[in-house]
Image (cartoon, rainbow, N blue to C red):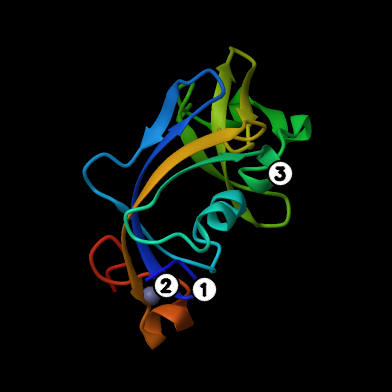
Amino acid sequence: MTITKDKVVSMTYTLTDDEGKVIDQSGDSPLVYLHGHKNIVPGLEKALDGLAVGANATAKVPPSEGYGEYDPKLKFAVDRNKLGDQIPPEGSLVQLTGGSGQEFVARVIEVTDAHVGFDANHPLAGQNLNFNVTIKEVRAANAEEIAHGHVHGPGGHQH
Ligand code: ZN
């Protein structure tokens, strides 16, 4: 069975940056996703299309097909006294509410006496993503999974 839209794919992967440093890897528990439903970055989904069980593939995904270009406008600072007593430590991820009520996640990049600096870019924005992937299993998704747009059961959503 090969990877096409509405197949559930189980794979192991290693993700490295352009210097060869490992950013993320699946280890012993394969990543399970529903193909053709934007569960994974577009560039990787495209690279996996048509592969069969057992295939080993590498894919170099540019930012435009990964986590986006780095946008300097997504860096901002908030007055420290507006944040009350709970100042998050540098490097932590916090959920914030924007001007029109939308929630988003930002990383704390600087804490000074006057302000706290945030960066709402994805941590991998602006980076090439170098994937090395091995396809472990491919199965047809059931109707409920296709309707929900994600995988149920082992490795997927439990609900
Ligand atoms: Zn579901």
Would you name the residue on which mark 1 appears? 5
**Do labels 2 and 1 touch, CB within 8 Å?**
yes
Q: CA distance from mark 2 to mark 3?
A: 25 Å
Quarter-wise, where is residue 92 in the image? Answer: top left
Query: At x 54% / y 27%, what residue is drawn?
Result: 108
Image side of residue 98 versus residue 103, left or right: right
Image quadrant of ligand 1? bottom left
Crowd tier of the residue under label 2, counting other residues whose Cα lies within 10 Å: few below 14, some 14–19, many 20 or above: many
| Quarter of the image that includes the N terminus | bottom left
From the top left corner, tell me how far across and down residue 20 is, in percent.
48, 21
Q: Residue furthest bottom?
A: 143
Crowd tier of the residue under label 1, counting other residues whose Cα lies within 10 Å: few below 14, some 14–19, many 20 or above: some
Q: Secondary structure at mark 1?
A: loop
Crowd tier of the residue under label 3, counting other residues whose Cα lies within 10 Å: few below 14, some 14–19, many 20 or above: some
Q: Secondary structure at mark 3?
A: helix
Image side of residue 57 versus residue 37, left or right: left
Give me the disc on residue 7. Answer: 2
* In this rendering, the label closer to the viewer, 3 or 1: 1
> With respect to residue 4, does 71 lie above or below?
above
Query: At x 45% / y 59%, what residue is drawn?
Result: 51
Would you name the residue on which mark 3 appears? 64
**Nearer to me, 103 or 43:** 43
**Nearer to me, 19 or 135:** 135
Query: At x 72% / y 37%, what residue is drawn?
Result: 69
